[in-house]
Image (tube, rainbow, N blue to C red):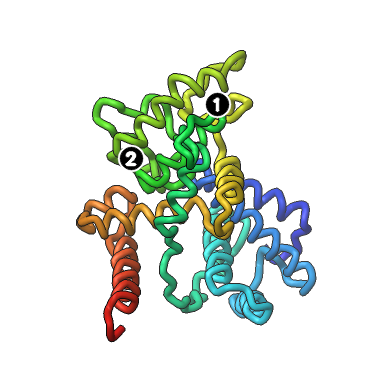
């Protein structure tokens, strides 16, 4: 496999790789998009430096990563690029497109530990008030079908800690109003049942009985719980855009993301007395160590409260 490969041929391989990752590993749309972006960046770099894209040495790949570091890319981004290259060359080797996986011998960069971004209680209240049935004066708000849907999405994100990919893929049959639970499929198609508090379930039921039929009027039926104004599955991109628009309407920090709702859910239920194993189950973490970061977040908050409230703090 020493012959040079042109961009068009490499682009075809990117497409095949992404398709296989979606089929075989059930990779999310977000992950697939990142795979494609990372590999195209690598392809352009290989072209600029006259390196054979499908037959680089591990030293050449290390040079690529070093240039990203010199360009001040975040270490998390560089490690993601390396992870993408590992997966791609492993696939290409098995498929007979490459001779070996040069990324296997490369070590990821050590990342500084950062705590998850948590939404303050005041900001959360403002987020959940944007599409609420009553305004700040306690008056009934005239809401569109999209407003009712958006409120249900926001309530569910905070009530369950689901990933937006899981929320996007939520089916009608997966919502159980009798037991106040939803059934979602997380990473690796792992199924889990998540309890949802009554207020969020009421918001979802109102959406399902009133707003959803309006959004689907004159359009084909859908198996997905949340649908767009076109009657299609509410995509992750649409949820992100809706969330950003909500932040603007609430007049708060637009650096928040839907994933911060998940972080805030985990932190709040731990502070409320939930045990770590239960939170691990609700979040769908395969390792308890992943969930433990939220205990550090709670400890940091306690330190802040102590400093602010203690007379000698």
Q: Report the disc number at residue 233.
A: none
Name the foreground residue: 303 vs 282: 303
Camera sees residue 80: yes
Is residue 208 found left or right of 87 in the rendered image?
left
Question: How many numbered circles are shown?
Answer: 2
Q: Give the CA distance from mark 1 to mark 2.
A: 30 Å
Tell me the quarter of the picture where residue 205 sits: top left
Tell me the quarter of the picture where residue 301 sits: bottom left
Q: Are marks 1 and 2 in contact (CB under 8 Å)?
A: no
Q: Residue furthest front?
A: 137
Is residue 161 found left or right of 58 in the rendered image?
left
Name the foreground residue: 217 vs 61: 217
State the SS at label 2: strand
Picture layout, residue 56 above or below residue 144: below
Residue drawn at the location 35% of the way across and 44% of the way down: 160
Picture layout, residue 107 above or below residue 6: below
Disc 2 target residue: 191
Is residue 309 found left or right of 247 in the rendered image?
left
Disc 1 target residue: 145
Name the foreground residue: 79 vs 119: 119
């Amino acid at each position: 496999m020493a012959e040079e490969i042109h961009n068009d041929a490499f682009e075809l391989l990117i497409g095949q790789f992404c398709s296989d990752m979606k089929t075989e590993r059930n990779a999310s749309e977000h992950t697939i998009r990142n795979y494609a972006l990372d590999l195209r960046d690598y392809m352009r770099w290989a072209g600029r430096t006259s390196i054979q894209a499908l037959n680089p040495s591990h030293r050449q790949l290390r040079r690529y990563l070093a240039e990203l570091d010199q360009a001040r890319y975040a270490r998390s981004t560089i490690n993601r690029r390396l992870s993408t290259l590992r997966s791609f060359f492993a696939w290409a080797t098995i498929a007979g497109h490459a001779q070996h996986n040069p990324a296997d011998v490369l070590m990821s960069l050590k990342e500084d530990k950062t705590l998850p971004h948590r939404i303050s209680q005041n900001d959360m209240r403002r987020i959940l008030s944007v599409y609420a049935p009553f305004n700040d004066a306690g008056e009934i708000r005239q809401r569109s079908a999209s407003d009712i849907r958006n409120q249900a999405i926001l309530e569910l994100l905070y009530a369950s800690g689901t990933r937006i990919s899981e929320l996007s893929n939520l089916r009608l049959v997966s919502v159980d109003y009798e037991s106040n639970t939803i059934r979602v499929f997380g990473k690796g198609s792992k199924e889990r049942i998540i309890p949802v508090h009554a207020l969020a379930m009421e918001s979802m039921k109102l959406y399902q009985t009133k707003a959803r039929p309006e959004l689907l009027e004159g359009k084909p039926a859908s198996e997905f719980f949340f649908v767009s104004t076109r009657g299609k599955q509410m995509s992750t991109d649409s949820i992100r855009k809706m969330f950003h628009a909500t932040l603007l309407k609430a007049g708060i920090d637009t650096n928040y993301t839907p994933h911060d709702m998940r972080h805030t859910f985990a932190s709040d239920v731990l502070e409320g007395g939930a045990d770590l194993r239960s939170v691990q189950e609700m979040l769908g973490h395969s390792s308890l160590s992943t969930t433990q970061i939220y205990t550090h977040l709670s400890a940091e908050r306690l330190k802040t409260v102590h400093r602010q409230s203690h007379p000698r703090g």
